Amino acid sequence: MVAVVPLRDGSSGKSRLAHALDPASRSRLVAVLARHVVGTLLASPGVERVVVVTSDPRFTWRALRDVVVDAGAGAGDDGLPLLTDDADRLRIVLQPADRPGLDAAVDVGREIATQDGPVRLLVAHADLPALTTADVGALLAEDAPVVVATDRLGSGTNLLALDPPASAPSSTGLLSESGSERQEPRARREARFRFRFGPDSRAAHVAEAERLGLRAVVVQRPGTAVDLDTVDDWGELPADVRAAVGLHVPALRDHDA
């Protein structure tokens, strides 16, 4: 299993919290949530690699540095920080400027994940503060080619697991050995699972599975259901999760129930 995590930059993320948090606090929140999600994925049995697709690799590296740097080991002989074993399992990929948007970011991650052949794919949003390894394990245990973990309202998609061949990439962005874009027959392109993140994405992803003749299972778990986009989302989180996030983003504590 390869996990793909699309991540926005630290300046434009969490815009729906602009009335509650200043820009610096929103940037810290994006980093804290991404660090939690990526760390949870790397700690989950069955997840071999994590690919983070972002328009701002420098911000992403700063956000995820603590996940892969061995803080207790000091520095190596060259003065550089020593990395944990997880460093080899994490890849940060630049999202091309000519392929903007969430669906395109996930497609880029899918292309990277499947470069060496078919894999099971798990797409995870980077803002799931209550996500646990048990949640990831439960999704991986589902016996279906398409698994949709919906949000607390039951309309969105916070995680999406795809088995081969659904996890195979589309032709968009794939390059031939000469560097030119490789075109596939229309029938093959239409056989690819097309990501449909955004409003009502749960229904859209289930419909996409049906279009391909694949069975889809929809699950909703406490750790996968709440993505932190609004003050209402904050209120839905368990107290211990709010306390942990609030240590890094104190302004959110003003909105505790």
Image (spheres, rainbow, N blue to C red):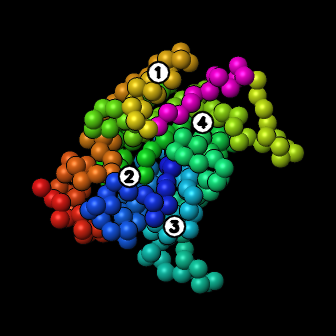
Name above or below for residue 176 compared with residue 86: above
Q: Mark 4 or 3, which is nearer the eye? A: 3
Name above or below for residue 178 compared with residue 210: below
Query: Taking 152 as reference, is 58 left or right?
Result: right
Residue at 44 percent across and 24 percent down: it is 206
Range of residues picked out in magenta: 186-197
Could you give the CA–CA distance between mark 2 and mark 4, rounded to whole angstroms? Answer: 24 Å
Could you give the CA–CA distance between mark 4 and mark 3, rounded to whole angstroms? Answer: 28 Å
Q: Amino acid at mark 1?
A: Ala
User: Given contact means CB atoms under 8 Å apart, are the residues at marks 2 and 4 in contact?
Assistant: no
Name above or below for residue 225 compared with residue 218: below
| Residue annotated with mark 1 | 207
**Where does the C terminus fall, quadrant-wise?**
bottom left
User: Given contact means CB atoms under 8 Å apart, are the residues at marks 4 and 3 in contact?
Assistant: no
| Residue annotated with mark 3 | 59
- The one of 4 and 100 positioned closer to us in this rendering: 100
Q: Earlier in the sequence, mark 4 or mark 3?
A: 3
Furthest residue to the left?
Answer: 257
Q: Amino acid at mark 2?
A: Asp
Q: Mark 1 or 4, which is nearer the eye? A: 1
Residue at 44 percent across and 75 percent down: it is 71
Q: Earlier in the sequence, mark 1 or mark 2?
A: 2
